Amino acid sequence: MTIPNQIVHLCKPKRTMKLLENKTAIITGASRGIGKGIANNYAEQGCNIAFSFASSVDKAKALEDELSSKYGVKVKGFQSNAGDFDSSQKFVDEVVAEFGQIDILINNAGITRDNLLMRMSEEQWDEVMNVNLKSVFNLTKASLRTFLKQRSGSIINMSSVVGVMGNAGQSNYAASKAGIIGFSKSMAKELGSRNVRCNVITPGFIETEMTAELGEDSLKKWTDGIPLKRGGTPEDVANACIFLGSDMSNYVNGQVLSVCGGMLM
């Protein structure tokens, strides 16, 4: 018995389009921690990825190979210093030449140089400001021409709950992360009429390679203060990034989304 082609066609399962399919994202600081989690989940959702790395060529190549072979998307790392204005412009120009578009910019590069203000050096202050805050200005400004020409784009800036509530011994980090929030709200107002959105994510205590170095007692002290009684994962932050980068958030602009298990209310 021959089954008509029309019935065969109807019986075939429909392919579900992924949330970020055919989009291209720039992600800074993607070689480890939260940035690597974002890159993985974005690739899983069909997004092509351009990421920057500072020094580790081997790690960058490994990430390229892993994500492209696992998810079948285009992934390319670019050696660049996000805290340097000219380097950031060159990075974005190379991404546009390679990928042809930028749909999402995730400013995730960040460092800590913790110390009480009495003991903090000017170098520690400047280094944190340069990497954490100036990089956001650098990459956003470098990407603007492309976003405005496309009349579309989503900028996602990674702040921290520390930028909202402060923390002793982290005045430089807190100031840089608070600055990101003010900058992002200003960008949301400047760029909204061109259909370019800008939002902020404030992660709380996220378990990464850095927090793994903390002792068990320190970990318990942190998690005891979180209503969900656990630390977050890079994937928790990545899921928020997927929402803000996808068309599901087309009417979300200038907002601060806290991914912290209730630490900040």
Image (cartoon, grey):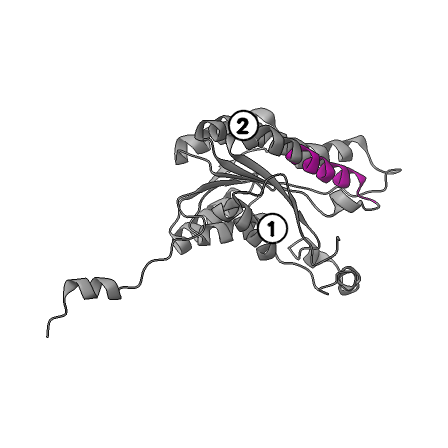
Query: What amino acid type is highlighted by mark number 2?
Result: Ala
x 57%, y 56%: residue:
235
- Labels 1, 2: front one: 2
The amino acid marked with disc number 1 is Ile
Magenta segment: 169-184
Q: Quadrant of residue 251?
A: top right
Per the rendering, the mark at residue 34 is 1
Q: Is residue 35 above or below residue 3?
A: above
Rounded to the nearest whole Å, what is the CA distance between mark 1 and mark 2?
A: 23 Å
Residue 145 locus on image (x, y percent): 49, 25
Q: Does 101 sit left or right of 261 as displayed?
A: left
From the image, tell me which residue sits under label 2.
142
Q: Does the magenta portion include 175?
A: yes
Where 154 sits versus 151, above or below? below
Q: Secondary structure at mark 1?
A: helix
Query: Is 155 in front, or is 171?
Result: 155
**Which residue corresponds to the image point at 69% horizontal and 60% vertical from the top-left?**
231
Please report whichever mark, 1 or 2, sits nearer to the chain's N-terminal start.
Answer: 1
- Expressed as whole percent of the image width and height from the top left, the position of residue 72 reads 37, 51
